[in-house]
Amino acid sequence: MGPTRDGTDVHILRKADRATEGGDPSGAIAEYLQRHEARGLLRFITCGSVDDGKSTLIGRLLYDARVLLDDQAAALVADVAHTGVNGNGIDFASLVDGLSAEREQGITIDVAYRYFDTDRRKFIVADCPGHEQYTRNMATGASTADLAVVLVDARKGLLTQSRRHTYILSLLGIRHVVLAVNKMDLVDYRQDVFEAIADDYRQLATQLGIDHVTCIALSALEGDNVLERSTHMPWYQGPLLLDHLESVVVDAPRAAGAFRVPVQWICRADQDFRGFAGTVLAGSVAVGDAIAVAPSGSASTVTRIFSGDDDVAQARPGQPVVLGLADEIDISRGDVICAADAPLATADQFAANLLWLDPQPLLPGRPYWLRTGARTVGATVSELKYQIDVNAQTHLAAKSLECNQVGYCNLYLNEPIGFEPYAQSRELGGFILIDRQTNATVAAGTLDFALRRAGNIRWQHVDVDKTARALIKHQRPRCLWFTGLSGAGKSTIANLVEKQLLAMGRHTYLLDGDNIRHGLNNDLGFTDEDRVENIRRVAEVARLMVDAGLVVLVSFISPFRAERKMARRMFSDGEFLEVFVDTPLAAAEKLDPKGLYAKARAGELRNFTGIDSPYEVPENPDIVLDTQKHDAETLAGMLVRALEE
């Protein structure tokens, strides 16, 4: 069935269609693209709310366009014969939903890619799930699409997920959208229903800056206005779905700008050659061209260009290359080689859009990994400017983001990166955030612009450093970080330790949690977000005190491992000692010198550590002080002796 293909294409498409786990199977997309020129190829997605008919529409499109492979068509006929149904009884969604869980539940879970071509165009379509919990998969599919088909059930109109998906399309730079008002057969093909939904969607698209919206009234199950014009809707004079997909002109991929190639791999063919592998994103490069490297700013000249096994004189956009340079300069995976006369901007602070994808909320100040292209750097959301209401497109004050919420934030990176705003380059302006402990992807985002202070602030050199300050004090600077439950005895032991160190002539300072909240942190409460910021500020102060040559004692509950690890990373090796004051909850609650546990048990004190807010026990503390075996004086003496040793 369907158009004739050469044997190679059939092999590629079979490999893709038979993948059992969705996604980009075995590099099939890349192989398909290599076989076909980018000109005339359209990558699009279907998205929208649950049960709006996305998989059915793609199945109907493939079936009616007669582009099914022989084994797919045979399996479909066998299924119809087995179930005793025919005609519109065909389960078109089964052509797309490949996971067993999808077929069992009748829903789409993963992104399913399908590849087909007609006489006029070649297509890669990504069928994206509609359930809110799989929003991350929809964002994945949209990240490489040129156009989106947003399905809306004619009976329900625009739902929250329809609006959320449209906002994500706008965020990811998709400017061509087809609004497919589906299931028109279930509303008696009424023109007023279609026009009301179309008007609502055009208004939403205008608010989001989506320039090109085409509204089509159709029924995926019945085939109305998919490939053939519907006899039930003579009032509809717009395009058919396939006709529009075959003829729509989307913005050409960015390729005409200055030369850019992100480094994917360092190639050492032999001792005499060191090359840098990547794909040309934009511009072109020729042997003899001067280049610069971002973010380091190093410069050199291109001496050789390899494309596959061949030496070539020039490379153009979309071409994989290995570049040889005239100079032995430091280039790492994730750096960007660019034209010397149009160097890439670098920065370490950004304003960015963020789509939060993790069940655990975003906590500003908590450290994450940021990955853009092949480069990974440390990052924190330094400030959440606002959350976005996807229904009303209004800005809401917020301290955090929950799963599938979107917001606008400031990002701080621990080192500069080369970048372009996402509006100019998806590859150089898109990123994901990764949890440092679980390695789970927790957010996807787009860089908007570099904050001005990122370019105006430089580290000022000073001649008197930490070593000199410590030398005059005749001591080794340290940070002793006391952590444990409220009432565990942290402050008592820390106070005794400082007294003993002072008697020995040491220069010290004690930062106590309650005392700090009277001043520096008096604007913070006890939510998880405020606790993270509380620790971040104190860790910065402690770092400055260690830089001054002091032995600083920090006595804070600091309940989260991630924030204690963040604090440790601010110090040099050996400067930070995590001291776990090990007191069981029952013992701490029995002491309860401030009566806080009693208030928490009575519901009068919210977000109290150990009761309705967790305490994460240190996994590998440097020192453990067991308050059940020794009194405070003994433990303080043990700690001082350990320090001296």
Image: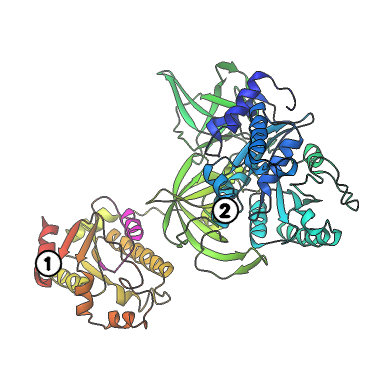
Say the numbered circle drawn on residue 550: none
Q: Is residue 565 magenta?
A: yes
Query: Could you classify mark 1 by the number of other residues whose Cα lies within 10 Å: few (under 14), some (14-19), or many (20 or more)?
Result: many
The front one of 350 and 107 is 107
Over which residues does the magenta segment extend?
Answer: 554-573
Task: Name the amino acid type tagged 1.
Answer: Leu
Closest to the observer, 228 or 518: 228
Closer to the camera, 230 or 242? Answer: 230
Which mark sits nearer the N-terminus, 1 or 2? 2
Judged from the image, the secondary structure of the residue bearing numbered disc 2 is: helix
Q: Secondary structure at mark 1?
A: helix
**Along the line of sight, the residue nearer the viewer: 609 or 478:** 609
Residue 226: give x, y in percent of width and height. Answer: 79, 43
Amino acid at dot 2: Thr
Q: Quadrant of residue 228?
A: top right
The image shows residue 542 at horizontal and vertical percentages of 31, 63
Residue 635's mark? 1
Q: Quadrant of residue 613?
A: bottom left
Instruction: Judge whether residue 252 can be spotted in this image.
Output: no
Tag on residue 135? Answer: 2
Q: Is residue 100 above or below residue 409?
A: above
Q: What residue lies at 57% left-to-right and 66% top-to-bottom? A: 386
Q: Is residue 494 above or below residue 285?
A: below
Number of marks in picture = 2
